[in-house]
Amino acid sequence: MGGWIFCGEMIIFVGYNFKQLSCRDMPSLKKIVIQNFRNIELQELEFSPKMNCICGGNGEGKTNLLDAIWYLSMTKSAFLPGDKFGFRYGCDSFGLSGTYAMESGPDTRISIQVSGNGEKKVKRDDKQYTRLSDHIGLIPVVMVSPMDANLVMDAAEDRRKFVNSVLSQVDKTYLSNVQIYLRLLQQRNKLLKEQRGDEKGPPGGNRPEDGHGNAANLRSQARVLRGDKSAAARVLRPHIGLR
């Protein structure tokens, strides 16, 4: 199963077996409901299990439709820097819902509700996930757009993000290691910033115990990544100075 959805110059493929390069035993999007997401007030669409072509004028929401489909798979936007930018003008929340045909069982429904206070609820068949990462990989998705030229022309950061988004959908260990890596990177940068602040000694600056606490947390998570024997961990360790 699985299907292509064409919108203008962009393509999204929902339900794909990256390991076997086939569409068998993979989900297929049957129906989507979008409410107050970007410029879409309320829209309900049904899809063919094979190929779908969406056409319309500029600014009518073709790209936003693809972004909603991506959001249901990855629990975040493919384009926006944060959830708050997904609210339709004048709204403080949005909702997405998708019904998927599952080859190995009955249809499943994925719903996402994001509120203005930052709360995000992701549910499968009305049962809420305790961790968003548990959902990643259930409905593999790949998007192709003219912006993909940046993968070749621009900085390596774009290529890393693309590779991470694909591999994280097929390898839970890789996803876990990427999350640890990003936390380590963030904590390292914060620790370095605090140390620079301590050196300058500004009035009311950082407390020494804060720096010690962050350093201890950094060392603890570094031990987790250092002890991981997977190929993904071996790739990630050098980027934060671990061997």
Image (tube, helix red, strand yellow):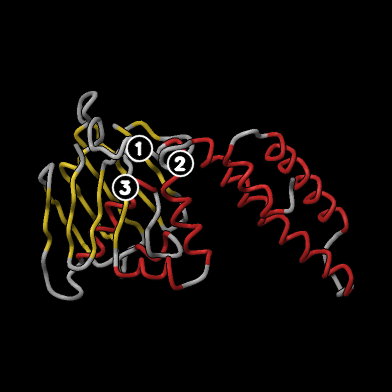
Looking at the picture, tell me which residue is in the foreground, 125 or 151. 151
Q: Given the image, on which type of amino acid does mark 3 rest?
A: Val
Q: Secondary structure at mark 1?
A: strand
Neighbours of disc 2 within 10 Å: few (<14), some (14-19), many (20+)? some
Residue placed at 42% from the left, 62% from the top? 84
Of the numbered discs 1 and 2, the one sitting upstream in the chain is 1
For the residue labelled by badge 3, is the local secondary structure a helix, a strand or a loop?
strand
* x then y, percent, for residue 25: 25, 30
Callout 2 secondary element: helix
Q: Which residue is mark 1?
A: 123
Report the residue marked by disc 2.
132
Q: Earlier in the sequence, mark 2 or mark 3?
A: 2
**Distance between mark 1 and mark 2 Cα atoms:** 9 Å
Nearer mark to the viewer, of 2 and 3: 3
Give the amino acid at mark 1: Lys
Pointer 3 or 1: first along the chain? 1
Which quadrant is the N terminus positioned in? Answer: top left
Relative to residue 110, is residue 76 drawn left or right?
right
Q: Nearer the viewer, mark 3 or mark 1?
A: 3
- At label 2, the amino acid type is Leu
Q: Give the image quarter of residue 150.
A: bottom left
Q: Residue at x 66, y 57 (%)?
A: 186
Measured as percent of width and height from the top left, residue 60 is found at 17, 70
The residue that mark 3 highlights is: 141
Q: Are marks 3 and 1 in contact (CB under 8 Å)?
A: no
